[in-house]
Amino acid sequence: MKITEKFPPLPLEVLVDRIKNFETLSTDGKHKLISELVNIHPFLSADFSKGHVFRRARKILPDEYPSKVQDLLWNPNLSRIGRVNPEGYSVLYVSDRIETTFSEIHVKDDYVLLSEIEIQEGEKCRIYPIGELIKVQRTGRGFLIGDNSSAVNDMLNACDRESSQSLLITDAFLLDCLIKDDDKYLISSYTAKCIFEKNTNISAIAYPSVQQFGALNFAVKTDNFWKNWCVVAARRMKVKDLPLGFYKWSKTEHVNDIDPDGNLKWEKEDFDDLYSHRFTPWHQR
């Protein structure tokens, strides 16, 4: 069975007309179309396991040494609306590269706390890379599905032209809703909410960084976070931006351990700018 037979998209002419009129709709009208498209669109997700490192950064004061493991992650008392989370819906924003995290928080000349997390030994997390179909169709390789991209491309080519176009336009539209909404995130956060609610097995949504070309960000659900994830490294450093998304850092001090109660143990004034100092993976028990 062809993918467009298993997941029938809207008829091409109907879809094109509704997308062209999208900006004239009220917020509720926009949400209604997004919900409808998410419900009928296929998700190509990928299971990740231990070995993939994700990074999170936040600005801190020059003399600040965060003391608790939660300081490395999300603020449990703050869940304001963001690109991939509606108000009151908590996610942890992480990136695939160190410099991407600096770009996302707009580092200029600041002290930064950088933490690293990964999936626990023996666990798996399902990650949905939004826009995967359109990425395969346009470049031959998806964000995350890697060597399976050729099979996906063959699957798309097996569909009739109009159905394939409708499927790809839907994919591109939902991607745009997520990454091109800079007006209070009312569209992007709702798109993410629909995706998380459609497939509760999804642990994170991967999406292209708006701040740094070619990089990926991940919005990780914090519900049952410690069931699958662990913290493996943390450091504080002075970071200065260079042109075009590059950075240099200095005065890097590392956490060398986290005790069973989640207290951070710092190696103060023992500087190493070159490497991450990994400690025994820590997760809440």
Image (cartoon, helix red, strand yellow):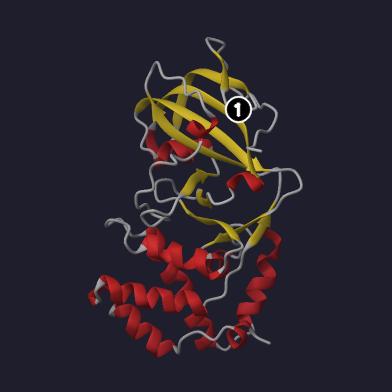
* Residue 241 seen in this snapshot: no
Tell me which residue sits at (40%, 51%) in the image.
210
Residue type indicated by callout 1: Asp
Secondary structure type for disc 1:
loop
Percent across and percent down for residue 82 are 37, 52
Q: Quadrant location of the C terminus?
A: top right
User: 213 or 54, which is in the foreground?
Assistant: 54
Q: Is residue 81 above or below residue 154?
A: above
Q: Residue 32 location, x and y as percent?
A: 36, 77
At x 60% / y 39%, what residue is drawn? Answer: 117
Residue ID at (63%, 73%): 153
Quarter holding the N terminus? Answer: bottom right
Q: Which residue is mark 1?
A: 261
- Tell me which corner region of the image, top left, top right, bottom left or bottom right, holds residue 164: bottom right
In the image, residue 137 lies at what x, y percent? Answer: 56, 70
Answer whether residue 134 is visible to the viewer in this image: yes
Does residue 255 appear left or right of residue 208 in this picture? right
The single residue placed furthest to the right in the displayed view is 122
Looking at the image, which is closer to me, 116 or 272? Answer: 116
